[in-house]
Image (tube, rainbow, N blue to C red):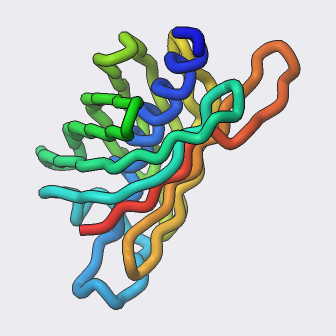
Amino acid sequence: MGVKVLLSSAAALALASLILVASLPSRGDAASPPPAGDPFDQLKGDWKGAGTVILDDGEKKQVDCTVTYKMAGSNITQTLHCKGSDYEVNTTLKVADKSGKIKGTWNESVYDASGSVTGTAKGNLIHALIAGDKFSGRMSIKLTDKGHTINVIKLNNKTGTYRLATSLSLHR
């Protein structure tokens, strides 16, 4: 498998973590649905989960992930580590939420990828456009009372089409 294939998928997973930062619900208890307010409120601390990364050649990689969030007002720093039997990604990012508009930067150290993200965070949905040196695409996040799911779709710059690249589920 070529380095380019791994690089693109690693970038997809790294970018998934960007939206993860803006996606977690404010909640009084785990059973309540996410409110329509700022999704940054409950990000502090540690999260874990698992999911699938789909490489450019269609091969699926199962990964387990841990995420730590540190907050300063509406700014957040996230560290994400996901690892499978033969796949790994480590991301550090900084994102801000200003009145429901998200904007930030990310860096992935294993595959040396970086970029930016812009989008919206409202209620239980996050939508974002992703641009980077090795990846472009879209993300959607759906929040539930049990956690959240992240789907990343990758843009094929040659054809203008999108395909699923990453799907993760995270919880406390």
Residue lying at the far right of the rendered structure: 159
Quarter of the image for residue 153 reads top right
Residue lying at 54% horizontally and 13% vertically, measured from the top left: 134
Residue lying at 34% horizontally and 21% vertically, measured from the top left: 108
Q: Is residue 27 left or right of residue 113?
A: left
Position of residue 100 measured from the top left corner of the image (x, y, whole percent): 44, 53
Task: Determine if residue 103 is in view.
Answer: yes
Residue lying at 46% horizontally and 33% vertically, measured from the top left: 15
Position of residue 11 measured from the top left corner of the image (x, y, whole percent): 48, 25
Count of all numbered marks drawn on residues in the image: 0
In the figure, 53 relative to 167: above or below?
above
Location of the N terminus (image quadrant): top right
In the figure, 105 relative to 169: above or below?
above
Q: Is residue 150 left or right of residue 48?
A: right
Position of residue 106 measured from the top left corner of the image (x, y, whole percent): 35, 25
Residue lying at 22% horizontally and 65% vertically, measured from the top left: 42
Task: Determine if residue 127 is in view.
Answer: no
Residue lying at the far bottom of the rendered structure: 31
In the figure, 77 relative to 92: above or below?
below
In the figure, 115 relative to 48: above or below?
above
Position of residue 118 measured from the top left corner of the image (x, y, whole percent): 51, 34
Observer-nearest residue: 152 or 3? 3
